[in-house]
Image: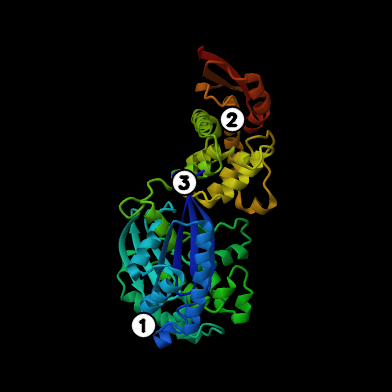
């Protein structure tokens, strides 16, 4: 298998990141390493106007390690960018030259608007969202992008972030009402002078960056959310404010023990999280959508041709195909099983009466139901459950993703689905019944293509009073109808209270 590696280095105001990705056989891309060091380059910049010597030395030490990693991975292309701290510092250019001399990395110091555009490309190519205000609060600046119809409409970069807000308003340790009032007054003035907020009224906020990821992680710990999936995690304004108020009510020692909050953010979290809540209040935003993809992902997407004029057309489809390729899924078989499952779903609508949009659930479970075979055939449905839940499938809501995983998990059993205790609170009774129904359709379809040669060309379901007659039209040979009834009949009877029978007609014989 041919693999071309690319490295992206993001020299931020708070942390320095290296992301390594592999491009396999010119077919699919996968992140293979991601490392972060909290260098805090912007520490002291707001007071002195220059990068501090100890921070610069730590940054060089970090980048030297990244140089070794890039060499070990045999990376052909390294793209390195720097943001607010290097933009603002009087000695930023000298530091760029020093990095080049010591590590060989050629660093581009990008303006705030360019940073915001890369955030936008990372988020909009991984989230199925049409209209939103994107917000990325970094260590030394905060970027905003107004998005309409997936298009970038307006971009602005404001000169404050988690580090300089904490320094300016004394929010590192004890937080008082007076300090928060001063912060609120400062933000109100900044927001009132910025037109993007009035144009974003009522839109969801797409949140990018470490502060916002930590808000989501703290909330998941508070509510004991069983899935640690940061991307596309959604929170209402009340939940965001709850996290912000919780952190603001703690001192530094208490915050350092707050579950979900990174140790390196304990002293800079209050100001930045408060800014997030303040933005949502300003535009009357109904929801925060957390994006785990941002600047670094935007660089990668742009490198592979997904720019502002060529966004990923169908996020869900592209992500699904990449996972299938990664796990060596039998693609012709998977597509045929999907076609049969969709046919059963359509023709049996008078029985299942499902009205919600389940297209993505059907497709994800059908296309990835055998993905677990890559790990081990025995109990591969259990491995498929884990893969669907954790392989990074994009463009699908987290609850629908969970249901897709359970549909695949239950496609090899006649028993009523059982939900692991950790997931019980996420799935209502009607959702469990839906899983039961869709996993039955998937199970029947899997058996119809057990020969894995696409022999079934058409289906016609005849719904009778006490029976469903499944007419199967095949070419070349028949299906094992007795085996299908034996394996699926009991479940069909339990789910729909009707007997399943199969009639097979070979329409073309070799």
Tell whether 378 sits left or right of 349. Answer: right
The percent position of residue 321, horizontal first and vertical second, equals: 48, 42
Which mark lies nearer to you, 2 or 1?
Answer: 1
Total numbered labels: 3
Distance from the alpha carbon under mark 2 to that under mark 1: 65 Å
Compare marks 2 and 1 and give the one earlier in the sequence.
1
Which residue lies under the disc numbered 1?
A: 90
Task: Classify 41 as above or below 219.
Answer: below
Q: Residue 261: which quarter of the image? A: bottom right
> Please, which residue is most extreme toward the top here?
509
The percent position of residue 482, horizontal first and vertical second, equals: 66, 19
Which mark lies nearer to you, 3 or 2?
Answer: 3
The percent position of residue 234, horizontal first and vertical second, equals: 50, 59
Distance from the alpha carbon under mark 3 to that under mark 2: 26 Å
Residue found at x 61% / y 22%: 467
SS at mark 1 in the image: loop
Which residue lies under the disc numbered 2?
A: 446
Viewer-closest of 238 and 326: 326
Viewer-closest of 229 and 281: 229
Residue found at x 47% / y 79%: 56
Q: Callout 1 environment at 10 Å: few (<14), some (14 to 19), or many (20+)?
A: some
Circle on res. 28: 3
Task: Classify 315 as above or below 145.
Answer: above
Compare marks 3 and 2 and give the one earlier in the sequence.
3
Can the viewer see residue 498 in this picture? Answer: yes
Tell whether 314 sits left or right of 376. Answer: left
The percent position of residue 443, horizontal first and vertical second, equals: 61, 32
Task: Classify 421 as above or below 381.
Answer: below
Q: How is the image coloured?
A: rainbow
Compare marks 1 and 3 and give the one earlier in the sequence.
3
Distance from the alpha carbon under mark 1 to that under mark 3: 42 Å
SS at mark 3 in the image: strand
């Amino acid at each position: 298998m041919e693999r071309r590696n690319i490295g992206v280095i993001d020299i931020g105001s708070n942390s320095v990141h290296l992301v390594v990705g592999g491009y396999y056989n010119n077919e699919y891309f996968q992140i293979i390493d991601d490392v972060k060091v909290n260098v805090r380059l912007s520490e002291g910049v707001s007071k002195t106007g220059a990068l501090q010597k100890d921070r610069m030395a730590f940054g060089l030490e970090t980048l030297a390690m990244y140089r070794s990693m890039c060499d070990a991975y045999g990376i052909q292309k390294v793209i390195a960018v720097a943001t607010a701290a290097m933009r603002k510092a009087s000695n930023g250019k000298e530091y760029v030259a020093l990095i080049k001399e010591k590590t060989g990395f050629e660093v581009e110091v990008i303006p705030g608007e360019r940073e915001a555009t890369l955030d936008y490309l990372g988020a909009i190519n991984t989230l199925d969202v049409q209209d939103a205000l994107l917000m990325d609060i970094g260590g030394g600046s905060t970027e905003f992008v107004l998005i309409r119809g997936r298009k970038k409409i307006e971009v602005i970069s404001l000169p404050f972030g988690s580090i300089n807000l904490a320094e300016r308003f004394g929010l590192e340790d004890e937080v008082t009402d007076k300090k928060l009032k001063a912060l609120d007054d400062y933000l109100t003035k900044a927001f009132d002078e910025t037109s993007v907020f009035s144009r974003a009224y009522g839109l969801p906020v797409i949140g990018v960056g470490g502060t916002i990821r930590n808000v989501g992680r703290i909330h998941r710990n508070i509510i004991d959310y069983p899935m640690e999936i940061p991307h596309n995690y959604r929170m209402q304004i009340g939940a965001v404010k709850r996290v912000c108020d919780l952190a603001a009510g703690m001192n530094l020692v208490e915050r350092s023990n707050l579950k979900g909050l990174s140790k390196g953010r304990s002293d800079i979290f209050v100001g930045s999280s408060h800014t997030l809540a303040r933005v949502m209040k300003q535009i009357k935003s109904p929801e925060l959508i957390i994006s785990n993809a941002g600047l670094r992902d935007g660089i990668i997407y742009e490198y592979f041709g997904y720019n502002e004029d060529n966004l990923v057309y169908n996020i869900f489809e592209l992500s699904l195909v990449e996972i299938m390729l990664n796990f060596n899924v039998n693609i012709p078989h998977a597509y045929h099983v999907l076609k049969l499952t969709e046919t059963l779903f359509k023709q049996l609508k008078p029985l299942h009466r499902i009205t919600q949009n389940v297209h993505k659930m059907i497709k994800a479970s059908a296309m990835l139901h055998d993905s677990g075979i890559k790990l081990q055939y025995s109990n591969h449905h259990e491995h498929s459950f884990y893969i669907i839940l954790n392989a990074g499938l994009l463009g699908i809501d987290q609850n629908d993703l969970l249901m897709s995983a359970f549909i695949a998990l239950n496609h090899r059993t006649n028993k009523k689905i059982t939900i692991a205790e950790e997931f019980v609170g996420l799935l209502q009774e009607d959702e469990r019944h839906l899983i039961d129904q869709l996993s039955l359709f998937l199970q029947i379809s899997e058996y119809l293509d057990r020969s894995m040669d696409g022999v079934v060309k058409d289906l016609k379901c005849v719904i009778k009073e006490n029976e469903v007659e499944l007419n199967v039209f095949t070419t070349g040979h028949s299906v094992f109808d007795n085996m299908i009834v034996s394996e699926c009949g009991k479940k069909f009877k339990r789910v729909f209270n009707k007997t399943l029978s199969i009639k097979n007609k070979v329409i073309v014989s070799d």
